[in-house]
């Protein structure tokens, strides 16, 4: 479903697909799993059990399954909030480069 509930330049597509996040410049676990919640031409929202700080640069691989190839991109984390109810970190990322 595509929504435009705010004043963004690009519409967001609501999705619920697996995402693999590779942390750059981290000493801990380099790859974590999560769920991509929405996607647009310039960014995405995703959730993970692992904290990723605002300002971090990460590589994400979003797989829709089936015949579509995965989307691989370098992003900058622009929002990182912990949700006590779901026990997930809810993150927003700005796409820097499609890889």
Image (cartoon, rainbow, N blue to C red):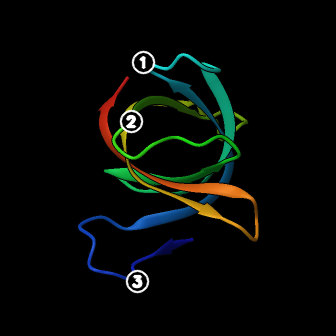
Q: Which quadrant of the figure has residue 77?
A: top left
Q: Position of residue 88 (x, y in %)?
A: 69, 56
**Dot 3 alpha-carbon crowd within 10 angstroms: few under 14, some 14 to 19, many 20 or more:** few
Give the residue pinned by disc 1: 25
Give the residue pinned by disc 2: 56
The residue mark sitting in front, 3 or 2, is 2
Helix, strand, or loop for circle 3? loop
Alpha carbons under labels 1 and 3: distance apart: 35 Å
Q: Earlier in the sequence, mark 1 or mark 2?
A: 1
Alpha carbons under labels 1 and 2: distance apart: 9 Å
Q: Position of residue 69 (x, y in %)?
A: 58, 29
Q: Are marks 1 and 3 in contact (CB under 8 Å)?
A: no
Q: Position of residue 79 (x, y in %)?
A: 41, 56
Q: Are marks 1 and 2 in contact (CB under 8 Å)?
A: yes
**Dot 1 alpha-carbon crowd within 10 angstroms: few under 14, some 14 to 19, many 20 or more:** few
Question: For this rendering, which residue is in front, 8 or 54?
Answer: 54
- Which residue is pictured at 44% across the width and 30% down the height? 58
- Which residue is pictured at 31% across the width and 50% down the height? 42
Above or below: residue 37 compared with residue 58 = below
Give the residue pinned by disc 3: 5
Above or below: residue 12 compared with residue 63 = below
Above or below: residue 46 compared with residue 53 = below
- Left or right placement of residue 56 versus residue 34 in this view: left
Q: Which quadrant of the figure has residue 5?
A: bottom left
């Amino acid at each position: 479903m595509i929504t435009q509930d705010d004043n963004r330049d690009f519409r967001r597509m609501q999705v619920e697909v697996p995402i693999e996040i590779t942390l750059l410049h981290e000493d801990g676990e380099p790859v974590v799993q999560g769920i991509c919640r929405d996607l647009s031409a310039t960014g995405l929202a995703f959730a993970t059990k692992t904290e990723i700080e605002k300002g971090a640069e990460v590589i994400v691989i979003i797989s829709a399954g089936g015949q579509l190839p995965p989307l691989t991109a370098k992003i900058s984390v622009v929002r990182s909030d912990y949700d006590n109810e779901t026990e997930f970190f809810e993150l927003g990322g700005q796409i820097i480069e499609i890889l």
